[in-house]
Amino acid sequence: SQKIEQNSEALNIQEGKTATLTCNYTNYSPAYLQWYRQDPGRGPVFLLLIRENEKEKRKERLKVTFDTTLKQSLFHITASQPADSATYLCARASGDDKIIFGKGTRLHILP
Amino acid sequence: DTAVSQTPKYLVTQMGNDKSIKCEQNLGHDTMYWYKQDSKKFLKIMFSYNNKELIINETVPNRFSPKSPDKAHLNLHINSLELGDSAVYFCASSLDIRQGRNEKLFFGSGTQLSVL
């Protein structure tokens, strides 16, 4: 079965530094990977999607990469701010009309 | 204007009771979903409907019965509630999954169910 793993449960980063979150998947490469942000008491909010044939995607201070050799996606937040503190979820299409999620990484940006 | 709205926000009930959670989306999407997020924050798909048709039933107990009266609504009814049902339930919607257009999900704000 398709799996998606986010190995870090929590990550503390100093304000102003770049936060890097990791997402690994098993078996075949999905057509795309997605990243969502979830704040306490709220539903996940879509941030970025990167397709299998794309190496990198950017949106403002966010950057996502997709490495099909390593079976990995990296999610970067540059010039991090305390307001970036949240849980970040990686998701993939499983190939049978499902989108499955990793367990998320809780990011804390320390002032 | 809330895109995906679900009610109630909080639901506290006794074991053995039957309860329902309602979800509505005003995005014009064809596909709607129910996800369960447990105490460890793991988000797991339960059901999805495309234009009122059930397309995913992810080995969820029969006590859970989704109903989609139209493509803008997907309700979740739970019979004989058990302690283990305590979790946050999220409704979501997307463009038509059958056309390969389900590229991003829009989530409601969740229903926190506590079974005592």
Image: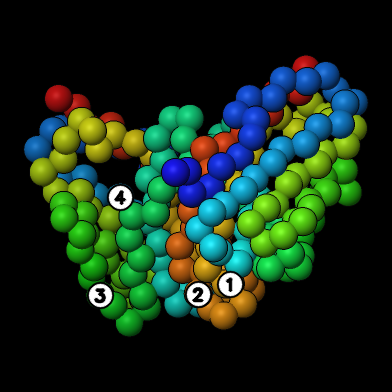
| Disc 2 with disc 3 on a shared chain | no
Query: Badge 2: how crowded within 10 Å, few (<14), some, or many (20+)?
Result: few
Give me the C-alpha separation between circle 3 and circle 4: 16 Å
Q: Chain of mark 2?
A: B
Helix, strand, or loop for circle 2? loop
Helix, strand, or loop for circle 4? strand
Q: Residue A56 at what x, y percent from top left? A: 23, 70
The residue under label 2 is B101
What amino acid is labelled 1 in the image? Ile
Residue B97 circle label: 1
The residue under label 3 is A55
Position of residue A95 in the picture relative to residue A50 (left or right):
right
What amino acid is labelled 4 in the image? Leu
Seen at 20% across and 59% down, the residue is: A59
The residue under label 4 is A21
Position of residue A79 in the picture relative to residue A52 (left or right):
left
Residue A6 circle label: none
Going from N to C along the chain, the mark reached first, 3 or 4, is 4
Would you place residue A16 above or below residue A102 in this image? above
Give me the C-alpha separation between circle 3 and circle 1: 25 Å
Give me the C-alpha separation between circle 1 and circle 2: 5 Å
Give me the C-alpha separation between circle 4 and circle 1: 28 Å
What amino acid is labelled 3 in the image? Lys
Q: Chain of mark 1?
A: B
